[in-house]
């Protein structure tokens, strides 16, 4: 009946919204919840969803394509170029050794050569689940880490190429001539996608300007045209999706278009694909396959051992340390995105049995848990290959001076009861550089400029600006208020800041989160995405002039950390305050890494041209959040860094958000300093979770 697709879609939306949240509260992966939800709603449960229905086929197919597209989109091509030769070397090791191992496993358990090679290809790829850990430790410049990241391109492309050949052979009438024809077609097709769509995308983005909606639609069109082209030459559509991700990788960058792409995929289509995998699972057969555990055990141990052997070869070849070798192994161990997608295709084509599908799901859960755990232990003793102490011109901290965050400060005003503290802090910063404050109110436009609703809103905002102007002058600051009409509040703030050439935006924030923030984002997020300058989001519990002890937790020695230190030092100098730089190190950190970190923090302090001399505090502890919260009890203000978090491409394997957890427990005033999105990299970070502005 006509109602059935709507009912199915409504059930899927409810599952995607509720189940991952529940599992994450239990400290379990949201992905596992989606799989189990599929099992519960399928033929072995309530039988509410059908894998063979047109609705599920369409939505799950889009999710499968989207999954591989995002995998290609999020590969860091710049890091790959920096170490492409060694990345190719490790890529070969971590592709060939698992491929051979998986093929042997397949033959031992009675699969033919074609299916065995396909099982080997499932071993060959990897998903960088533990990347947030090495990013938090500041190790993204370590050569072994960069090489492992770059190797992802080789393993994913190689695994998908093997998949294409195996599926082609399985369809019959496959000779040496047809294989050569397929490879030639694939080569020509890949060149058209990678170079043709890249050139076309650059031209389209250049001509479309800020039309994000059209740019988003263009990228989607590229994805599905590439997928269609792959099927026309006789290979799987997910290969075209992955190549499309590589083609538009450097075009979309890390701006709002990429955020929209990831949002649509990670919130809707990719979760539906994982639910569909759950629908495929025959629960009794899954339990039976676990009772006959030898195939599952062979696949899991074979993968883990082969990835270790590949990392060992790379360690010996490139003379890395044991810690670097173990880190490379643990980073390349998790099998999620490409592995699950290829398994699904092989199962659908009848090449892989249900036992293999079940074993791969167990493999996914084991490696997705074990890999990050080992990375956290092994990487804790590493140090970046390039440090802030280096004098080479490639050092981003040395070659580009820091902008003074105090010349022109934009302060959006909304709540008259809290704007006093906001304006006082802005005044302290502005006076330090003989700067000015720009209070701003944004009134949403109306189709009729003489509408009573618009006139009333303008009058209310004008009253707020009058009060803000009086307060700013009371604090001794030069003030230039702006009353603006715009079609979007966040864009109005960002556009006015750009027009005023602002160095900083100071906003208020109330500590709230919920479904609205999850579904629609929030004003602060949108200002962070669109702003050209840093944004200081504040929760001020007392007047800034009474903040004499400032704590700055530092995760890693990066340019963005320098921004937070600079902000604290300027505020301290303007307010005769003390600053403490706190680093909570992993308890497994080696003495060499601890000494290096302390030296880095001391050097970072010397980069500030202020009279304030900060104290350095190093603490080794497992509980980073608890340690920061405990130390913060002796301080008036804590300054943290935040920037929008890259969406997780594998269905919300949950990584702890330190900043969010700290903010929830702090009892003192807080400043969250966010960098504009176009200056950030694609590495995962800490997202500010709020949905209302109180300033």
Image (cartoon, rainbow, N blue to C red):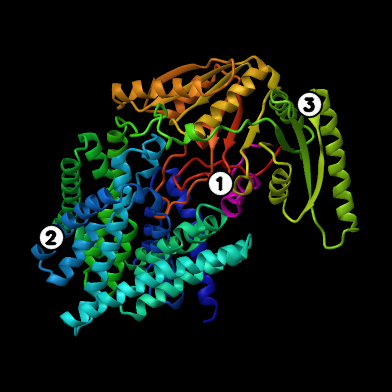
The residue tagged 3 is: 477
Residue shown at the point (51%, 35%) measured from the top left: 560
Q: Earlier in the sequence, mark 3 or mark 1?
A: 3
Q: In this figure, which residue is indicated by the disc labeled 1?
A: 677
Q: Nearer the viewer, residue 692 or 448?
A: 448
State how far apart marks 2 and 3 are (Cα): 73 Å
Residue 179, relative to residue 312: is it above or below?
A: below
Q: Is residue 76 visible?
A: no
Q: Nearer the viewer, mark 2 or mark 1?
A: 1
Residue 259 horizontal side relative to residue 423, left or right: left
Residue pictured at 67% horizontal, 25% vertical: 541
> What's the CA distance linking mark 3 and mark 1?
29 Å
Label 3: which secondary element: loop
Q: Are there few (<14), some (14-19), or many (20+) residues within 10 Å of tag 1?
A: many
Give the residue at mark 2.
105
Q: Position of residue 15 (x, y in %)?
A: 48, 59
* Residue 428 spot, x, y in % from top left: 71, 24
Q: Is residue 135 above or below residue 218?
A: above
Magenta region, residue range? 507-527
x, y percent for residue 647: 47, 51
Residue closer to the observer: 146 or 656: 146
């Amino acid at each position: 009946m006509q109602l059935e697709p709507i009912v199915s879609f409504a059930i899927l939306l409810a599952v995607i919204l509720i189940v991952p949240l529940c599992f994450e509260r239990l400290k379990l992966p949201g992905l596992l919840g989606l799989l189990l939800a599929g099992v519960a709603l399928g033929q072995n449960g309530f039988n509410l969803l059908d894998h063979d229905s047109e609705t599920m086929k369409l939505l799950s197919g889009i999710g499968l394509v989207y999954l591989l597209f995002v995998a290609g989109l999020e590969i860091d091509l710049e890091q790959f170029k920096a170490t492409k030769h060694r990345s190719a070397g490790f890529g070969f090791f971590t592709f060939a050794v698992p491929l051979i191992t998986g093929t042997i496993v397949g033959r031992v358990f009675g699969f033919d050569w074609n299916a065995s090679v396909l099982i080997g290809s499932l071993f060959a790829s990897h998903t960088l689940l533990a990347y947030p850990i090495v990013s938090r430790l500041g190790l993204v410049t370590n050569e072994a880490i960069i090489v492992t990241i770059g190797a992802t391109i080789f393993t994913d492309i190689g695994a998908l190429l093997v998949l294409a050949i195996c599926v082609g052979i399985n369809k019959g009438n496959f000779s040496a001539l047809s294989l050569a024809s397929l490879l030639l077609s694939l080569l020509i097709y890949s060149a058209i996608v990678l170079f043709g769509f890249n050139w076309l995308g650059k031209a389209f983005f250049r001509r479309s300007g800020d039309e994000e909606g059209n740019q988003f639609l263009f990228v989607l069109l590229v994805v599905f045209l590439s997928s269609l082209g792959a099927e026309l030459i006789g290979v799987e559509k997910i290969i075209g999706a992955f190549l499309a991700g590589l083609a538009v990788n450097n075009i979309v960058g890390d701006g709002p278009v990429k955020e929209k792409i990831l949002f649509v995929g990670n919130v809707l289509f990719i979760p539906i694909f994982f639910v569909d995998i759950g629908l495929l699972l025959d629960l009794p057969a899954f339990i039976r396959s676990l009772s006959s555990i030898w195939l599952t055990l062979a696949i899991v141990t074979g993968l883990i051992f082969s990835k270790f052997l590949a990392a060992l070869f790379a360690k010996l070849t490139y003379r890395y340390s044991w810690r670097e070798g173990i880190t490379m192994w643990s980073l390349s161990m998790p099998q999620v995105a490409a592995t699950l997608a290829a398994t699904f295709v092989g199962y659908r084509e009848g090449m892989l049995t249900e036992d293999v599908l079940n074993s791969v799901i167990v493999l996914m859960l084991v490696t997705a848990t074990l890999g990050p755990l080992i990375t956290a232990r092994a990487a804790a003793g590493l140090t970046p290959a390039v440090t802030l102490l280096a004098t080479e011109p490639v050092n981003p901290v040395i070659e580009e001076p820091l902008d003074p965050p105090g010349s022109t400060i934009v302060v959006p005003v909304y709540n008259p009861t809290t704007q006093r503290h906001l304006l006082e802090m802005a005044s302290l910063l502005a006076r330090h550089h003989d700067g000015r404050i720009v209070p701003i109110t944004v009134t949403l436009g109306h189709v009729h400029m003489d509408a009573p609703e618009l006139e009333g809103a303008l009058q209310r905002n004008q009253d707020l600006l009058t009060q803000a102007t009086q307060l700013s002058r009371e604090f001794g600051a030069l003030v230039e208020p702006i009353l603006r009409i715009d079609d979007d509040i966040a864009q109005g703030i960002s556009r006015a800041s750009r027009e005023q050439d602002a160095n900083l935006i100071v906003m208020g924030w109330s500590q709230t989160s919920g479904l609205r923030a999850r579904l629609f984002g929030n004003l602060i997020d949108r200002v962070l995405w669109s702003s050209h300058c840093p944004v200081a989001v504040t929760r001020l519990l007392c007047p800034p002039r009474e903040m004499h002890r400032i704590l700055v937790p530092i995760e890693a020695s990066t340019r963005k950390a320098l921004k937070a230190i600079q902000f604290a030092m300027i505020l301290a100098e303007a307010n005769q305050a003390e600053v403490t730089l706190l680093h909570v190190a992993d308890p497994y950190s080696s003495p060499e890494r601890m000494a290096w970190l302390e030296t880095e923090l001391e050097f970072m302090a010397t980069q500030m041209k202020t009279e304030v001399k900060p104290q350095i505090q190093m603490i080794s502890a497992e509980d980073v959040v608890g340690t920061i919260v405990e130390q913060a009890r002796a301080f008036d203000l804590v300054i943290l860094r935040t920037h929008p978090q890259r969406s997780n491409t594998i269905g919300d394997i949950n990584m702890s958000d330190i900043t969010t957890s700290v903010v929830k427990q702090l009892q003192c005033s807080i400043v969250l300093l966010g960098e504009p999105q176009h200056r950030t990299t694609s590495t995962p970070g800490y997202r500010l979770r709020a949905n209302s502005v109180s300033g």
